[in-house]
Image: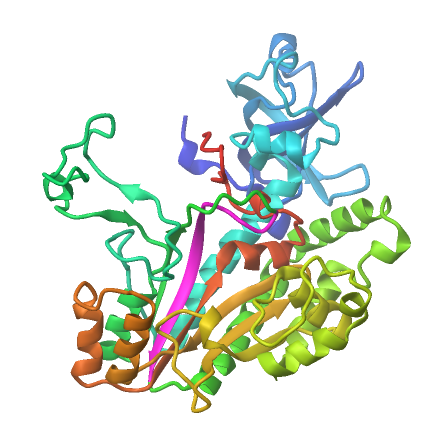
Amino acid sequence: MAFNKRVKIKTILDQHPIGSEITLMGWVRTKRSNKNVSFIALNDGSIITNYQVVADPNLIAEDILKKCTTGACLKVSGTVVESQGAGQASELNAKSIEVLGEADPEKYPLQPKKHSLEFLREIAHLRMRTNTFGAVFRVRHALAFAVHQYFNDKGFFYIHTPIITASDAEGAGETFKVTTLDIANPPRTEAGSVDFKQDFFEREANLTVSGQLEGELAALALSEIYTFGPTFRAENSNTTRHLAEFWMIEPEMAFYDAEDNADLAEDFLKYLINYALKNCQEDLQFLENRLLDEEKSKPADQRSEMGLMDKLKFVAENEFVRITYTEAIEILKRSKPNQKKKFQFLIEEWGADLQSEHERFLVEKHFKKPVILTDYPKEIKSFYMRQNEDGKTVAAMDILFPGIGEIVGGSQREERMDLLVNRMEELGIPTDEMWWFLDTRRFGSTPHSGFGLGFERMVQFVTGMGNIRDVIAFPRTPGNAEF
């Protein structure tokens, strides 16, 4: 069958090899026929554009052409010729067509019409065959590649941190447990609690919420590292911004202070956006047109001021605004939505934990630029963040993006042993269980920093998709572990 001799549609469109004999393989998007000829739009996923196959019924048997329905998979051999119609420079005159896989048109759920995103989530196993999701996942691939290229070019080392851990890095307690015990009848101690000594790891274990703590261990030996892997939160949240399983990019750097950390994060985000703009133009143009079409049904005051490409260029070309949490609180307290009680969570005093509505007001209404917020109250941040000299705040840093809210969270880490231990004791974090983490402060400690970028939120921003469930192939959310 010589599958390895097939030519990808992207290659044909790049090279236009007029007169060449080639073999294409792909899935039928549409077919239209008249008495003299059939036109089949084929797509193989290599590019958003379909390629037109022209099938002469004198050469291709009628029973074969009948099976060339939407969704069917074909192997087509023929000659590349100049296209007679508008829309593409060349097309394939078919000499032979083999149906590799049929698709019953009465049952195939993806017909050539507009399907809602909600419907497509129900058939996530097929939705990548649509233009929208083909574009999203090609962009996702490009961004993932760019992550590795960026850090590799800067001399960072890629560390695989564990998926199964015994620590909850965020201290939120929203973890998925990992066990081999019989959950219907677990072994128990004399006191009646579950006896985890008889479990596989001989202790309680869970899926990781972050690779950060292990990343710190590596950074305090290799200087600059990053992790990029799946993380898990058992948070019962059904918003458009949350997943139970998602991917995190977490660099950790020795000899970086809070300012260095913010500089790296801003440069990294701009690099990713510029990479997508350079390498995903056709997919981004399609996604921009899709957004424009979607916004026609919205009231004028709810429409975006910029198209997708312009928004991406704007973020990539402008300095991010940098303000402290304290300055942000003053802006929010004086804001119209707060004074007119339009915020769901009113800002009344310093110390409030900022919600998505506050973050988006700062970015979209007040500054109209991405914002780096620094120096948060220590009471609302994690134990490992470096305490500032005022005794009230920590050297934390969140980056806020339009339409998304928080996209990056990070900090300078607390490198001083006594202050770190005191903070852990204040929060009831057992220091004896974290002996390995504290060893990095006992032996050769140094100022160091790091941050986490939620990869799906980044893909969401770059593609303009409104729901985070539409930028990961198989979303895991409360009540949903299908596929």
Residue 57: percent from left, percent from top: 69, 15
Determine if residue 58 is in view: yes
Q: Say which of 49 and 34 sits in front.
A: 49
Compared across the picture, whether 234 is left or right of 182 comes to: right
Residue 294 falls left or right of residue 378: right
What residue do we see at 79% from left, 45% from top? 294
Quarter of the figure with the C terminus:
top left
Question: How far across and down, in percent of the image, does residue 360 sit?
Answer: 68, 65
In this view, 189 is above or below 461: above
Pick the residue in front: 379 or 437. Answer: 379
- Answer whether residue 247 is magenta in the image: yes
Give how far across and how far down residue 64 sits, in percent.
60, 13
Image quadrant where one finds the N terminus: top left
Nearer the observer, 187 or 217: 187
Q: Main secondary structure of the magenta part?
A: strand
State left or right for residue 85 relative to residue 370: right
Position of residue 13 measured from the top left corner of the image (x, y, whole percent): 63, 47
Q: Using residue 205 as the reference point, say whether residue 143 is left or right of it.
A: right
Q: Residue at x 70, y 20 (%)?
A: 56
Q: Quadrant of residue 225?
A: bottom left
Image-quadrant location for residue 277: bottom right
- The part of the image, by quadrant, that contains residue 2 is top left
Q: Residue furthest right?
A: 300
Vertical order, 284 against 321 (above or below): above
Most extreme residue toward the top is: 63
Span colored in magenta: 240-254
State the residue lying farthest toward the bottom.
389
The residue at 17%/69% (across/down) is 435
